[in-house]
Image: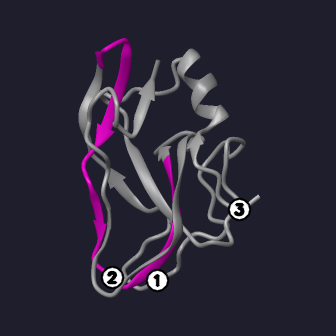
Amino acid sequence: MAIQQGGTNAFSTGLMNGVYNFTSGSFKIALYTGSASLGPNTAAYTLANEVVATGYTAGGNALTVSVVPTSANDVSYVSFTNVTWTSALTARGALIYQDGGTNPTVCVLDFGSDKTSTATFTVQFPTANSSDAIIRIT
């Protein structure tokens, strides 16, 4: 299947069941190699084909919510602060998930190709607004 970008089914149903709280919950982002199989059916964080590198810890890094759930132009959205790893590594994609319980997934990010850093690897999130935020619901 490779890496298929987008929200996960676990996120869609989890929203309806009150699983996620972007105001007080804890979220993480994990990085994956091009061999990973991630997509809409990825229900929980997985170790399979996660990046292995000096300075990278399994499970990824904690995310900080930069914009709590907000609505504008009939769109609700939330965003995160950019996240960095201070190590040389290569990643093809990422998985955002809620940290705790069953570690349910939120979304899969496909970087489009392998991205390599020699010192610092940064995932830069788009502008937090109703048109561009990383997570938007209409």
Q: Give the magenta part as a residue range.
A: 71-96
Spatial CA distance of label 1 from label 3 is 21 Å
Residue 61, image x, y percentages: 37, 60
Q: Residue at x 59, y 52 (%)?
A: 45
Q: Residue beneath label 3, please?
A: 2
How packed mark 2 is, by other alpha carbons closer than 10 Å (few <14, some 14-19, many 20 or more), is some
- Secondary structure, mark 3, is loop
Q: Quadrant of residue 134?
A: top left
79 drawn magenta: yes
Tell me if label 1 and label 2 are in contact, CB under 8 Å: yes
Tell me the kind of residue under disc 3.
Ala
Tell me the kind of residue under disc 2.
Ser
Q: Which residue is nearer to you in this view: 100 or 39? A: 39
Q: Residue beneath label 2, please?
A: 87
Tell me the kind of residue under disc 1.
Ala
Mark 1 or mark 3: which is in front?
3
- Secondary structure, mark 2, is loop
Tell me if label 3 and label 2 are in contact, CB under 8 Å: no
Q: Is residue 89 left or right of residue 24?
A: right
Badge number at residue 53: 1
Q: Is residue 95 above or below residue 7?
A: below
Main SS, magenta residues: strand
Spatial CA distance of label 3 from label 2 is 25 Å
Tell me if label 1 and label 3 are in contact, CB under 8 Å: no
* Tally of marks: 3
